[in-house]
Image: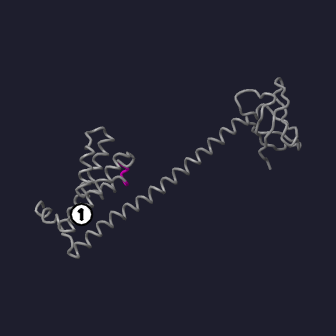
Amino acid sequence: MPNKQQGRVTKWQDDKGFGFIETTAGESVFFHVSEFKAQRRPAIGEEVVFTACYDNQRRLQAKEVQELGFVQQKMAQKNQQIRQRNHKRSAQAEFEAGQKKRLFLGIGFYGVLILLAVMNKLSWLVVGWYVALGFITYAMYAKDKAAAQSGDWRTPESTLHLLSALGGWVGAMVAQTYLRHKSQKAEFRLAYYLTVIINMAGLLFILAGGGLDFLEGLL
């Protein structure tokens, strides 16, 4: 069975096109220039990697002789690619887990609103307001992403934040997660979280009875 070994070129007859490699175990292995994979002639003293096997006369010889530095470079590149693939898989798994959490959060929020409305603690108009703003905000994010990709007129960030503050923050959250739009910019994310806080404060105000009449008057 052939096996990979490491060694050093100790003899080379350039006019005859063959030489010998000394292995780490001290064996001398014959190799022909046709088995040297570099686009040049071998150099005495250079370290190589090769496949050791026997010819028909049971003589040990080296096949697929490659420069040790070249093999190490290829191995480093392969390991880097493996690390990158593993990182992408990990990032993708984390992203998908985040998708589910945010989706459940949005569904849970709407579920709480519906429950409050069923218990007559919140007007159905408020529930309808949040649902409508959620869809509108998501649509605005989708429109802005399409504009960014095509170079068309963009939706101002202040408009997106205003929609979130008015009650469309669930739609914004879902859009940021599933459309991957406006999800990397730290300043935008911070402003988004502030709109969620503002909206939650407004909802608590409505639940306390301080703003329900005003909201129903607007609707």
Q: Please identify the quarter of the rendering in which residue 102 is found.
A: bottom left
In this view, the residue in front, 42 or 85, is 85
Above or below 38: residue 218? below
Q: Please identify the quarter of the rendering in which residue 208 is found.
A: bottom left
**Magenta span includes 105:** no
Q: Residues within 10 Å of mark 1 (few under 14, many from 20)?
A: some
Q: Secondary structure at mark 1?
A: helix
Region of the chain picked out in magenta, as a range = 177-181
Q: Position of residue 99 (x, y in %)?
A: 40, 58
Instruction: Give the amino acid type for the residue marked by disc 1 in the picture.
Output: Leu
| Residue visible at 81% across and 24% down in the picture | 14
On screen, residue 95 versus residue 146, left or right, reads: right
Q: Which residue is mark 1?
A: 203
| Residue visible at 40% across and 62% down in the picture | 101
Q: Position of residue 176 (x, y in %)?
A: 35, 52
**Magenta span includes 180:** yes
- Direction left: furthest residue: 217
In this view, the residue in front, 160 or 70, is 160
Q: Please identify the quarter of the rendering in which residue 38 is found.
A: top right
| Residue visible at 25% across and 55% down in the picture | 165
Query: How many numbered discs sit on the rendered protein?
Result: 1
Above or below 71: residue 193? below
Q: Quadrant of the C terminus?
A: bottom left
| Residue visible at 26% across and 73% down in the picture | 115
Q: Position of residue 212 (x, y in %)?
A: 16, 66
Q: Position of residue 39 (x, y in %)?
A: 70, 28
Above or below 58: residue 204? below
